[in-house]
Amino acid sequence: MTADHVAWVVPCFDEAARVDVPAFLALLDDSAPASLILVDDGSRDQTLAVLRGIAAQRPAQVEVIALPTNQGKAEAVRQGLLRALARGAGIASYIDADLATPPSELCRLAALARAGAYDILMGSRVQLLGHTIERRHDRHYLGRIFATCASISLGLPVYDTQCGAKLFRHTPALESALIAPFASRWIFDVELLARLVRPRPGIAAIVAERIREEPLLAWTDIPGSKLRPAAALRSGFDLLRLGLNLRRR
């Protein structure tokens, strides 16, 4: 693989009814090199069969990882990113299986990442004139509270930590950040950012100037979220614990 090769990691758990096969394949029709790493997180439905069907259509560009049991989105993403780095991808990315961020936007983000000016590129759901961001009001306002707390914890002026469209250049900091499993099943996005901007001793940190949030032109809130109220509450405690740990460091 080359430095401009983008590997799209897609964690999937019981997604058989929502997987949009043509949309996934559209990510591979870009003129620049790209691949898909589809991670089945111990699904109980026909998700694994659907993913293997996608791989059969593009065997050179699609790989399926089947985790034996459900380990949570955080671990599915970590395993997929590790595989992307092991295969030599210059840019390792993860996206949501529902493709709330449409393929056209993901390809636009990939082009920005390939330009080489950033080590971290994150899609951001900002409602602006000329943009189509369709998000439920309750999730938007709860998300704003969470993002503000995450920004304070990280010490970064980040607007949207939870958008499921993030691209990372292959760096020693990323390799180091993926060594250990994430402590949280749900706020691993924030935990990963924390590991990248405050890495292990001896690893060069990703500085703020090499991080970019890119407002998305389109994003749609797809029904079927697996985040339940109890998990949302637990995520708040996880964020508090992460903030305290960062302060100690």
Image: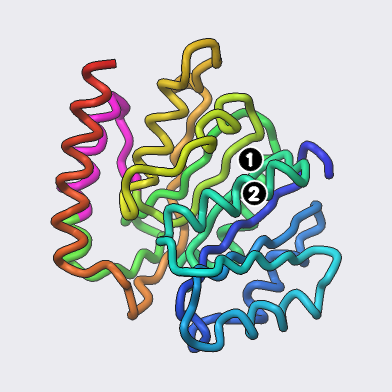
User: Which residue position holds label 1?
Assistant: 113
Extreme residue in the front direction: 68
Q: Are the residues tagged 1 and 2 within 8 Å (C-beta)?
A: yes
Q: Quadrant of the C terminus?
A: top left
**Amino acid under label 2?**
Ala
Q: Where is residue 198 in the image (x, y as percent from the top left)?
A: 41, 21
Quadrant assignment, res 71: bottom left
Compared to residue 163, the image places residue 243 above or below, namely: above
Q: Which residue is drawn at 74% across and 58% down?
A: 35
Compared to residue 147, the image places residue 23 above or below, namely: below
Extreme residue in the top direction: 202
Left or right relative to 235: residue 195 = right
Q: Is mark 2 on a helix, strand or loop?
A: helix
Q: Where is residue 28 in the image (x, y as percent from the top left)?
A: 75, 65
Q: Position of residue 104 (x, y in %)?
A: 61, 64
- Which residues are drawn in magenta? 143-161
Left or right relative to 100: residue 79 = right
Can residue 48 be found in the magenta stretch?
no
User: Which residue position holds label 2?
Assistant: 110
Q: Quadrant of the N terminus?
A: top right
